[in-house]
Image (tube, grey):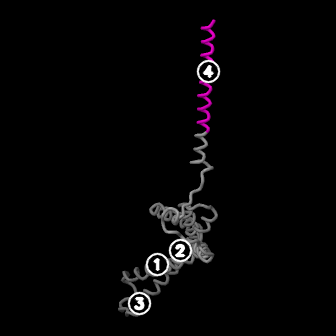
Amino acid sequence: MAASSGSASAADSDLKDLDSVGSDMGSSTIQYSMVLEHLIGDKRAAKDLNPGVMGGLPVPAKSDEQKMIERGMESCAFKSVLACVGGFVLGGAFGVFTAGIDTNVGFDPKDPLRTPTAREVLKDMGQRGMSYAKNFAIVGAMFSCTECIIESHRGKSDWKNAVYSGCVTGGVIGFRAGLKAGVLGCGGFAAFSAAIEYYLR
């Protein structure tokens, strides 16, 4: 009887030890999950990335004027004007370059044997450069404006914005020559925009 009672008490103590170990493991598991939530979960505290705190130079807070200038520079109107000016300059330079390598610049179709003067050559180069500049400026402004509007509407900044904008710009420009030209212009500009975005990204 004494032996049986001793074995029963030993078994009870073993069960109590197992229960205590299980409760300790459960509490440790709960504590571990709580630590994870505070480290990588939603309860993680936001770190202050101020350069002054991280050992760098402190950055002063932006004034209202600076914020207004930034909003203006990020607006679609400013981007369109900037693209228009850039396209005008680039188109003018391209037109003058193509006129410089063209051997027929300054020649009169009515009298092809007459040698043109320097003034006539410069005048023809200026007219061609101005024509190219206007076309590049219109294309640049249309492309930049439509891309900015599409990006604002979609809320994303990816390669699709340039493709959609290229399709719209090419379609509008080509539509003046007919529906077929508009479709070809849309596809051509979209493919060109996709290739440029793929190369740049």
Question: Disc 1 vs disc 2: Cβ atoms closer than 8 Å?
Answer: yes
Between marks 4 and 2 in the image, the one whose residue lies nearer the viewer: 4
Q: Which mark is residue 29?
A: none
Question: Disc 1 vs disc 3: Cβ atoms closer than 8 Å?
Answer: no
- Give coordinates of residue 192: x percent, y percent: 49, 65
Secondary structure at numbered mark 3: helix
**Which of the 4 image quadrants contains residue 17?**
top right
Kind of residue at badge 3: Leu
Q: Look at the image and tell me whether residue 170 can be seen.
A: yes
Circle 2 Cα neighbour tier, 10 Å, few/some/many (<14 / 14–19 / ≥20): many
- Give coordinates of residue 164: x percent, y percent: 57, 63
Secondary structure at numbered mark 4: helix
Magenta-tinted stretch? 1-30
Between marks 1 and 3 in the image, the one whose residue lies nearer the viewer: 1
Position of the N terminus by quadrant: top right
Residue where numbered disc 4 is placed: 15
- Tell me which numbered mark, 1 or 2, is placed earlier along the sequence: 1
Q: Main secondary structure of the magenta part?
A: helix
- Tell me which numbered mark, 1 or 3, is placed earlier along the sequence: 1
Residue where numbered disc 1 is placed: 90
Q: Disc 4 versus disc 3: distance between alpha carbons?
A: 105 Å
Nearer-the-camera pick, 178 or 137: 137
Q: Disc 3 versus disc 2: distance between alpha carbons?
A: 26 Å
Nearer-the-camera pick, 49 or 78: 49
Kind of residue at badge 2: Gly
Kind of residue at badge 4: Leu
Q: Disc 4 versus disc 1: distance between alpha carbons?
A: 86 Å
Above or below residue 154? Residue 177 is below
- Tell me which numbered mark, 4 or 1, is placed earlier along the sequence: 4
Kind of residue at badge 1: Leu
Residue where numbered disc 3 is placed: 122
